[in-house]
Amino acid sequence: MAHKAICIEVTEFLDTFFPLPEGVTADQHPQWAEDVFDGLAAGEVLTEQEIQRRFVETVNDNDLIPGLKMSTSSEKPDITEMGNFKQKPDAAIFKADSVPTDGRPHWADQLITVEFKRNTTSQDPFDDRKGAELESDAATRKEVRGQLIDYSELVFRIQHRTALFMILVINRNIRVLRWDRSGTVVTPAFDYVANPQLLCEILWRMSLLSDEQLGIDTSATRLHPSDTDYKLMDILALASETDLSSTHGHDLLPAERQRKDHIFKHVREKFQEAVDPKWPRYRVEVPDGDGVRTFLIGAPAFYAQGMACRGTKGYVAWDIQAQRFAWLKDAWRLDYERMEPEGVILRKLNAHGVINVPTLVCHGDIRNQKTRTPDIWEAQQPLRPATPASTAASVSPSPTLVDPAHQMSSTMSRKRTLVEVEDEDTSDGEEEYTLRRHAHYRIVVQEVAKPLSEFLSGKHLVSVIIDCVRAHRDAVAKANVVHRDVSSGNILILPKVVYNKNTGKPRVAWKGLLADWELSKPIHEAEPPLRPRQPPRTGTWQFLSVSMLTENPKTVEIPDELESYLHVLLYFSVRYLHSDCKDPAEFIESYFDSYTFQDGLYTCGLKKMRVIKTAGRLETRMGVPLMFYSPMDEIFRRLLPLFKAHYKVQDYLKKKDAALKLPFRNIRPMPSSAPPPSATVSLALDDDPDGVTAASLALDDDDDTDDDTAALQAFAAEQAALAIPVDDAPTPEEHARAALVQNHNFVLWSLKNVIYRRDPECRWGDDKVGDRVPHEYKPQVPLANPHGASARTMKRRRTTDIAVVPLAFSSLPKRLTQSQMPKAK
C-alpha cells in the first residue's frame, strides 16, 4: 500500500503549507542571531527535559513566533480529563493571549503540538537514509510514531480540524509534520543549531498563517462561557417535565397525547452529557440546499479511532433554525468518482417511502475542505495518478445515529498501544498505489437512536432485526439500493410513538432503524473495470458474509446482506443472552475477529467458514452444538442450512464456469445437476411465508432458442460438467434451499414466525443476562503470525475504531469499507 507518510524538502514544505501573505516578502523577516540556539549545541549530554526547557525558553525569549507562544506540558495530563485522556505532549504553541501557565496540555486550545526526544536515531520515527523505508519498523521508532499519531488523533477529536502541524525536536535535529485524514507530510531532519536561520524562518512563517492555514475548521465557531449560545446549551440540557419517557411500552398520558413534537428523555440526557464543561462547545455550519443551517454541539457522543481514516464523529445537536434536537455526523468521506454522499442516498430513500431509515434534515461538503496529502504523494508518483472525485461519498461503516459509547469491538474495547501504529485504512494485503482522498462532510438526520446492545430480550432483538430487514427489502424494491454494510453499529434502536391498531392508543415502542447508508449503491451495479470506486471489500469485517471475505473483489448481493443480518443476530445473542456457550469471549473472538492470511490476502476465519459453509449449524467447537434454549435456536436451525446450500450451489457454479475455460475433452459426460422446477419443491413450513409464493421461490429457467448459439452453449456446458465430480453437484433440495436466500421473503417469514406464532412451545422468557464478555478479557489468538504469511487463522483487528498494526506486518487492514476491518467508526 502507499505509505501514509511522505517526505518532502523543507523549502517545498514552506512553499506549500506556509506561504507568505500577499505583500510580504521573504527578506522582510526579523533579524535572527546566528547563535540563537547555541544553548542546545551540547544536546548529546543534555536530558530530554533540559532540551525541552532550553528550546522553549529560546523560542519565547527571542519572540521567534510573533503573536504566539510555546508552553510546556509534559508533567501533567489535562486537568479536565476529557474521556480519560492521559496523554502529555511535551509542549504546544498557543495564541499569546491564551497561553496556559499550569503546565497542562489544554488540548482544546493547542495550535501546534511540539514533542521532544533525546536520542537522534532510535527515537526518530522516520528514516531519511537513501533506500530506507521512511516509516521504519524498528520498535522504538515505531513506538514514537504511534505516540505522535495518538497526539494528532486527540487534537482532531477534541477540536474541529482540517489539519494539524507538529514540531518534532530530536536532540539537535528537528522535523516539521503536517497531519490530515489521508496521511502525514514530513520534512527531512535538519540540525537547527547549525542552521538556525531555517528554523527561525519556519517559526516566523507559522506566525503569519491564518486560522484556516493553521488547519482550524473555520465552519465551526468556538463558543465561550460568555456567549449567548453557550448559555443556551446549558438551558437546553436541563430536564423538562414535558420530556417523554423513552421506556419501551410506556402508554402516553392524555397531556402527552396533545403534544406533537416530543423530546424523548434519552435525547435530553445525551445532550446533557454533551455539554460537559470539560469539553469545548461549537456552533457549526451544515449546508442546506443553497443556504446554511447552524447547530450547537458539545462533546461527541461517538468518535471513531484512527488518524488516516474518515474520522467520524457523532453529536446530539441543537438545530437553531428548527428549534429541535437532531443527530449530526461529521466525517471525512472518501472523495472518489461515482460515490454519492450519504445525504443524497437518504433523500432518495425518504422520497421512495422506505421504512425504518433515518430522515434527512440537511447535508453537504464543508467549504471545499479536502485532504492535501494525496496531492503531495501523487506528485512523487507521476506515472500512477489517482482518480479524484467529482462526487464522492463517505465510506466506512461506523455507528452513527447512536450514542456510541457502545461502539464495540467484538469482544471488548482495546486502547491502542504505542507500538500499534496507524495503517488504519489499508487494503487487504494488496498494494494500493495512492493515498485515499477525503472530503469534509456533515449530515444531519432527525432521529437520535440507541445502540443495538440496549435491546431488551432475545425476542426484542429479533423484532429489531425484522424492522431492519424490512427496511433493506424496501430499499431494494422501491429505490433499487442495497445497503452494503449491515453491521452491529448500523442496526439501531429508535424509541418512537406508535398507535395500537385496535384501540388507537399511543405508546412508546423500541423499533429498529437501519442507518449509515454511505456505502450503499444501486443493486447489481457492476464495479468499473479499471479502478474500483473504493477498496475491494465493503463493510465491517466481523459481519461480512463468508463470500465477501473470500472473494476479492465481489459485488455485494442480497444473500450477502441477509447473511450479515444473521451474523449480527448471532453476535448479540452469544454476547448478551443465556446460552450454553461457556466462553462467549473466546467464541466471539474466533468467529467474528479471526481471519486467515494466505497467498498475501486476508480472508474469512475458519470458525465462521465452518459454521456457514460446512456444518450449517451453530457449534461452540467442532461437533458441540451451541444452544440458547429459546426460539432463537429455531431461527438458526432454519436459516443456517439455507446458507450452506447457497454456498454449495455457488461453489458448483463457479467450478462449472471455470471448467468452461478448459479445453474440451472427449470423455463420456457425467450427469449434471440442474435446479428442479419450483412446482416439484416441497418445503415443510409452519405457515405461509410472508410474501413467499411459488413465483418468488422459482429459479429462472432460461429458454434457449434452437439456434447454433444455443447448441454451442449447451455443448460447452455439457463438457464443463466433465471437470466436476458428480458428488459436488447440489441436490434438488439444496437448489430449493439456496433459492430461499436470494430475496428477503423467507428470511423475514422465518424471523416473524418465532415472534408472532401462537405456540405454547415457542416461549422466549427473560433471556438477556447482560454482557457476558468480561471487561478485563484479553484476546487469546495472536494478532498476526510473527514469521510471515501462513494459512492458519489469526485475529483480525477491529474495523471501525481500533487501529492495530502487529510488528510482523507493515500494514494490517482495519476496516473494510474504505477502511477495512473491524469505525470502533
Image (cartoon, helix red, strand yellow):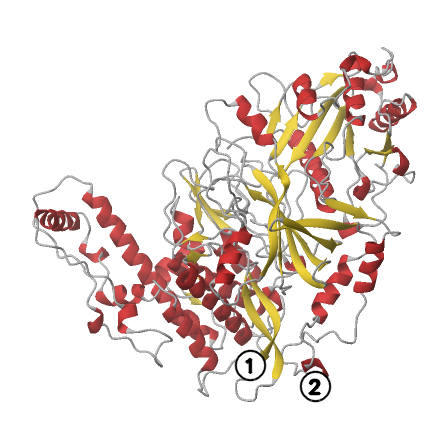
- 115 or 166: nearer the viewer: 166
Asked if residue 336 lies left or right of residue 214, the reply is left
Residue drawn at x 36%, y 52% as measured from the top left: 524
Give the numbered dot on residue 765: 1
| Residue 206 position in % (x across, y down) | 78, 26
Q: Which residue is mark 2?
A: 254
Give whichever of discs 1 and 2 has the lower sequence position.
Answer: 2
- 597 or 337: nearer the viewer: 337
| Residue 66 position in % (x across, y down) | 86, 25
Crowding at dot 1, Cα within 10 Å, few <14 / some 14-19 / many 20+, comes out as: few
Asked if residue 726 lies left or right of residue 759, the reply is left
Residue drawn at x 41%, y 51% as measured from the top left: 548
| Residue 715 position in % (x across, y down) | 10, 48
- 355 or 639: nearer the viewer: 355
User: Residues at badges 1 and 2 in contact (C-beta under 8 Å)?
Assistant: no
Q: CA distance from mark 1 to mark 2?
A: 32 Å
Asked if residue 467 lies left or right of residue 199, the reply is left
Crowding at dot 2, Cα within 10 Å, few <14 / some 14-19 / many 20+, comes out as: few
Q: Secondary structure at mark 1?
A: loop
Query: Identity of the amino acid at label 1?
Result: Gly
Vertical relation: 492 (above or below) 48: below
| Residue 204 position in % (x across, y down) | 81, 22
Asked if residue 635 lies left or right of residue 641, the reply is right
Residue drawn at x 14%, y 47% as measured from the top left: 716
Q: Secondary structure at mark 2?
A: helix
Query: Identity of the amino acid at label 2?
Result: Pro
